[in-house]
Image (cartoon, rainbow, N blue to C red):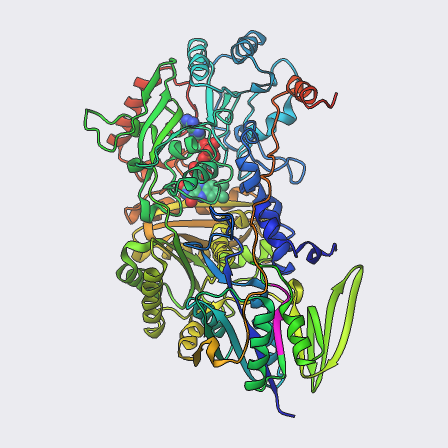
């Protein structure tokens, strides 16, 4: 059997440790001048692909893919520093791609690049749609195992464990297939200096949407974006009297 | 284990609501499961939510570990039998307590162990962060205004009642807790930000404001507090000034002697010294506020601070290296200054032992696969991430290709950045995980900086006090510190405090440092711990001048007695 030809799509999102703010117009989250990093679920996907190779599963190559602004190349380089072999970047500065558009794009990448395994994050933390993997599976007609917490592959056979209410579920399927990753799958590695250097020399193909035959036009319109109501901070009272008067004030006694 | 993944679909909302909780739910479990040290750490780093709710820290008791978890701390009077209670100091009476209660007019502002038993409540104010020093105070006062501080001191001065100023009680030299029955004057209720000037970045705040809160306040305006240290969630800016704390960013922003523009302080006789200047330049005679900066509470009580905050850098990068030798560390430091110049904001050194202690105490995974005798952490802060990345990359490429650095990682996101910093900031806490730690905070010329650690380790190997098993008091000798400031922290992690260990260390360490014209206290101060050893770094003349100043400001000697002066 020839080995795994893995595709890992990655997305550049607002760093998850940064608190997002809604823009003044209330139409979107403010992204200007805000720190961005790789979607944390995508880190898990890359890590898993690299671990498969390290576990001596035959891996032919690991291709990372991202569609989005030029800066997404940094995210692709990070993925390559973690161990991916090459990258494709579809440069798109303006259009916000919806999950279906991305899934259609990925379908073509899978076909053109002859992939037999796609590992995606179960969601990206910016839009939280959680649909791309499933849509891609549908478009390709491949089996899918979502929210994986453990993945083993022997020959053509993939075994995926996923956490479900009250326990775990184990699924088996034959390649080619789609896997989406969940938090407990692994702990992503740091990008090491030598690998960061090597990553700079790894091939990164730049493309545009025109290179693919897809309709990515928006089907949805964002009506409004609002922040959740601010949390009421707890207070501390000085003494028993303070507590009693506070309770009275709140109508509790 | 609850299915944490179930709360994830709404990640973004969670993120808006509670950063800390969200972090726990997003990160893979392995990073969350740090059973042993976690609660200690949260003690030091109040969560954001806590820190920002206005009243929540008002009554913070000092953050010493609960007395139940570990054996009781020995009384300082027992470990230092030659320090006798000064009989000129009056013992507290019920009348005194009544005076203070009337003055402060608030039950919670007085912890009264004089007229009743309050030993449990007093414990946290009496023992220090390292669990090494324990006083016998029976009264804690928590004033909420400068006027109250003034009246307290005037009364104490008149009655000859000794006073121990206390901030967040994170000091590392035993200065923050009493020796005998000194009154603890705790500043936790003086915790208001007074003003912040958006144009100049000048912050004026009460002494009891927690460092992290002060920094968060500055952050809201796009500024950064010019000091950062591992205890930021507990220590107070007044305490920071009183100890002239150095910390992690001194390399970039300089010392408090330069950044503090003004102070408000109360002298023992009750005089309020209002020198709360917000001027960058003020050459009008003696700069008396400098005496309080690093004075360690021996001249008066600092009640407010005016400090200049630099612009907060939007672009921050952190790299962590493994190096094969100390020579290479020196080389890397030199190169970092050359390549990164104005964006370099920290250069920290950690030896392999310190990283093992951190890993073993926290269960955290270390960033590098391989093992190296030395590790460094470099931080850059600048205003343009593309510019900074370019510089950093050129630097990294250089040190890698010249084989100055053997391996390394660069944080790719904010979480990794924080995990890398934790490898450095977590050492202090980890070193005392096994029971205790002897800490030395020293200035040593860079070329010889690490020799001390190596020699010290040899010493404990050959005298048989160090070993794997519990019958050896010493667990390990480690070195780390603010390399950029020639500041070494020598930590001897012990399973218990032991006179034999102390004898092997002192005065040996101090003599070693003196021979190299170093300082026996780079940033932690003298307190009680280094009282006997000041002579190794200061001449007779200097000491005499200090004593003269002490006598002018505090003729009755009521301020923080028994300590270094
Ligand atoms: C984990 C950890 C990391 C640390 N890292 C560093 C570091 O990197 N660099 C560094 O320099 N230090 C460091 N320290 C020690 C440092 O000195 C203290 O953390 C801090 O500066 C003290 O502030 P505090 O409010 O806790 O003061 P306390 O510990 O309460 O008091 C310290 C001294 O100042 C006096 N004092 C306190 N408040 C006042 C006041 N308002 N007026 C007059 N006197 C006062 C006290 O009497 C005492 O002598 C660290 C400590 C810990 C626990």
B193 inside magenta stretch: no
How many numbered marks are there?
0
Considering the whole magenta stretch, tell me its main secondary structure. Answer: strand
The reply to whether residue B59 is in sight is: yes
A122 inside magenta stretch: yes
Tell me which residue sits at (34%, 31%) in the image.
Answer: B293
Q: The N terminus of chain B appears in which quarter of the rendering? A: bottom right
Quadrant in which residue B123 is drawn: top right
Pick out the residue farthest to the top: B95
Above or below, B141 relative to B401: above
What's the magenta region?
A: A118-123
Q: Position of residue A92 (x, y in %)?
A: 45, 70
Horizontal placement of A16 versus A119: left or right? left
Q: Quadrant of ligand 1?
A: top left
Closer-to-camera residue (A216/B132): A216
Q: Position of residue B270 (x, y in %)?
A: 39, 13
Above or below, A8 relative to B552: below
Horizontal placement of B49 versus A35: left or right? right
Above or below, B267 relative to B326: above
Closer-to-camera residue (B112/A135): A135
Closer-to-camera residue (A148/B124): A148
The reply to whether residue B173 is in sight is: no
Horizontal placement of A49 versus B376: left or right? right
């Amino acid at each position: 059997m020839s080995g795994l030809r893995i595709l890992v799509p990655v997305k550049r999102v607002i760093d998850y440790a940064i608190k997002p703010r809604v823009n003044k117009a209330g139409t979107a989250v403010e992204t200007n001048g805000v720190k961005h990093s790789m979607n944390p679920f995508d880190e898990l996907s890359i890590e898993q692909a690299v671990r498969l190779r390290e576990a001596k599963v035959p891996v032919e190559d690991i291709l990372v893919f991202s569609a989005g602004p030029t800066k997404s190349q940094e995210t692709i380089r990070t993925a390559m520093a973690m161990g991916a072999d090459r990258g494709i970047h579809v440069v798109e500065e303006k259009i916000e791609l919806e999950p279906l558009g991305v899934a259609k794009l990925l379908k073509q990448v899978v076909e053109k690049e002859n992939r037999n395994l796609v590992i995606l994050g179960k969601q990206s933390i910016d839009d939280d749609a959680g649909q791309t993997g499933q849509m891609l599976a549908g478009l390709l007609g491949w089996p899918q195992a979502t929210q994986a917490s453990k993945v083993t592959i022997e020959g053509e056979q993939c075994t995926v464990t996923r956490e479900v209410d009250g326990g775990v579920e184990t699924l088996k399927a034959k390649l080619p297939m789609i896997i989406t990753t969940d938090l407990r799958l692994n702990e992503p590695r740091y990008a090491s200096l030598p690998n960061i250097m090597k990553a700079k020399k790894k091939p990164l193909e730049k493309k545009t949407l025109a290179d693919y035959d897809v309709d990515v036009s928006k089907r949805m319109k964002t009506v409004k974006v609002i922040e959740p109501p601010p949390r009421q901070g707890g207070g501390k009272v000085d003494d028993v009297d303070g507590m009693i008067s506070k309770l009275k004030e709140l109508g509790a006694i | 284990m609850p299915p944490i993944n179930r709360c994830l679909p709404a990640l973004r909302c969670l993120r808006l609501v509670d950063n800390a909780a969200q972090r726990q739910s997003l990160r893979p479990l392995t990073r969350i499961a740090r059973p042993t040290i976690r609660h200690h750490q949260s003690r030091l780093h109040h969560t954001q939510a806590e820190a920002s709710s206005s009243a929540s820290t008002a009554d913070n008791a000092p953050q010493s570990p609960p007395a139940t978890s570990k054996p009781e701390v020995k009384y300082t009077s027992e470990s230092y039998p030659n320090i006798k209670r000064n009989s000129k100091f009056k013992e507290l009476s019920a009348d005194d307590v009544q005076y203070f209660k009337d003055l402060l007019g608030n039950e919670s502002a007085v912890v009264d162990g004089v007229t009743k038993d309050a030993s449990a409540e007093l414990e946290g104010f009496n023992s220090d962060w390292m669990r090494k020093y324990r006083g016998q105070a029976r009264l804690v006062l928590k004033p909420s205004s400068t006027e109250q501080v003034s009246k307290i001191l005037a009364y104490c001065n008149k009655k000859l009642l000794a006073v121990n100023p206390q901030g967040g009680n994170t000091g590392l030299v035993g200065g923050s807790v009493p020796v005998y029955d000194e009154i603890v004057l705790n500043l936790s209720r003086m915790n208001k930000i007074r003003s912040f000037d958006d144009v100049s970045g000048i912050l004026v705040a009460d002494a009891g404001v927690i460092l992290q809160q002060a920094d968060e306040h500055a952050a809201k305006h796009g500024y950064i507090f010019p000091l950062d240290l591992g205890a930021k969630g507990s220590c107070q800016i007044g305490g920071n000034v009183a100890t002239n704390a150095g910390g992690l960013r001194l390399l970039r922003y300089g010392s408090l002697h330069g950044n503090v523009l003004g102070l408000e302080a109360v002298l023992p006789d009750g005089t309020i010294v209002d020198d709360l200047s917000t001027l960058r330049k003020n050459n009008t005679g003696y700069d008396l506020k400098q005496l309080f900066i690093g004075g360690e509470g021996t001249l008066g009580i600092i009640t407010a601070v005016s400090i200049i905050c630099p612009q907060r850098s939007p672009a921050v990068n952190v790299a962590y290296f493994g190096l094969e030798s100390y020579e290479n560390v020196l080389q890397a430091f030199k190169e970092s200054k050359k390549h990164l110049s104005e964006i370099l904001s920290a250069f920290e050194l950690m030896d392999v032992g310190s990283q093992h202690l951190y890993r073993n105490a926290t269960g955290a995974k270390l960033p590098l696969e391989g093992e190296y005798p030395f590790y460094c952490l470099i931080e850059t802060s600048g205003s343009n991430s593309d510019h900074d990345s370019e510089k950093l990359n050129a630097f990294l490429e250089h040190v890698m290709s010249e084989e100055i650095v053997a391996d390394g990682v660069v944080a790719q996101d904010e979480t990794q950045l924080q995990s890398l910093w934790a490898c450095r900031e977590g050492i202090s806490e980890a070193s005392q995980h096994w029971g205790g730690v002897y800490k030395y905070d020293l200035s040593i010329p860079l070329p010889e900086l690490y020799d001390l650690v190596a020699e010290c380790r040899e010493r404990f190997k050959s005298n048989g006090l160090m070993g794997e098993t519990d019958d050896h008091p010493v667990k390990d000798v480690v070195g780390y510190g603010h390399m950029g400031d020639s500041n070494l922290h020598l930590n001897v992690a012990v399973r218990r405090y032991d006179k034999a260990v102390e004898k092997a260390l002192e005065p040996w360490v101090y003599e070693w440092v003196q021979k190299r014209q170093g300082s026996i206290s780079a940033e932690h101060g003298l307190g009680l711990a280094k009282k006997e050893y000041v002579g190794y770094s200061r001449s007779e003349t200097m000491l005499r001048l200090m004593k003269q100043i002490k006598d002018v400001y505090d003729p009755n000697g009521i301020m923080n007695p028994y300590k270094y002066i």
